[in-house]
Structure formats: structure tokens, C-alpha cells
Image: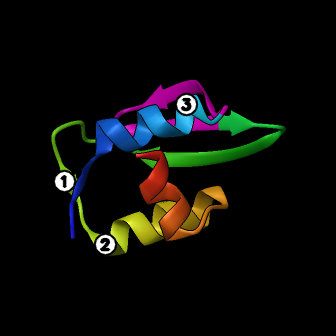
Amino acid sequence: MRLAKAARVLAALERDGWIEVRRRGSHRILVKADVQRVFAYHDTVDLGRSKLVRVAKDFGYSLAELRRMV
């Protein structure tokens, strides 16, 4: 399975309409349609399957949908 960098996942979320409203350290706070979510961003880190599953669930996607976006 191909791993994804956090930077690519964040870019995919932003392309899908999530807007970064603020940062606190490595945490990016994203908003879309009055829904707020936190994304732990470490730009050079490869995200494994379990982290991708968690991000997909938190942001309302299936793992397959998130993988296609990235």
C-alpha cells in the first residue's frame, strides 16, 4: 500500500473545500460548512493506514475516497 505525506493529504482536503482558519503548533484547524476539524500536520511524515483511516473518518470520508483525493 502506498503511503501518503501529510502535505498531500492537507492539500487534498483544501481542494475539497476545507479552509484552514488557524494553526497551533503542528495542529491545523480546518472548517467546511460550519464543521470544524483538527488535522495534525507534520509535512514530511508518511501517514500509515491507521492514521489515514482516522483522518478519513474525522473528515467524513471513506478510506477509498480519501485515497482517490490524494
The residue pinned by badge 1 equals 46
Q: Is residue 2 magenta?
A: no
Residue nearer the viewer, 17 or 41: 17
Q: Which amino acid is tagged 2?
A: Arg
Is any atom of residue 41 visible in this view? no
Cα distance in 3D space between marks 3 and 1: 18 Å
Q: Which residues are magenta?
A: 17-30
Q: Is residue 21 above or below residue 59?
A: above
Residue found 43% across the figure and 38% down from its top: 10
x%, y% of residue 29? 56, 37
Left or right: 57 as drawn, with respect to 26: right
Q: How many numbered marks appear?
A: 3
The residue pinned by badge 2 equals 49
Say if mark 2 contacts mark 1, CB within 8 Å: no
The residue pinned by badge 3 equals 14
Q: Is residue 29 above or below residue 21?
A: below
x%, y% of residue 63? 49, 68
Disc 3 is placed on an element classified as helix
Q: Is residue 16 above or below residue 63?
A: above
Left or right: 21 as drawn, with respect to 32: left
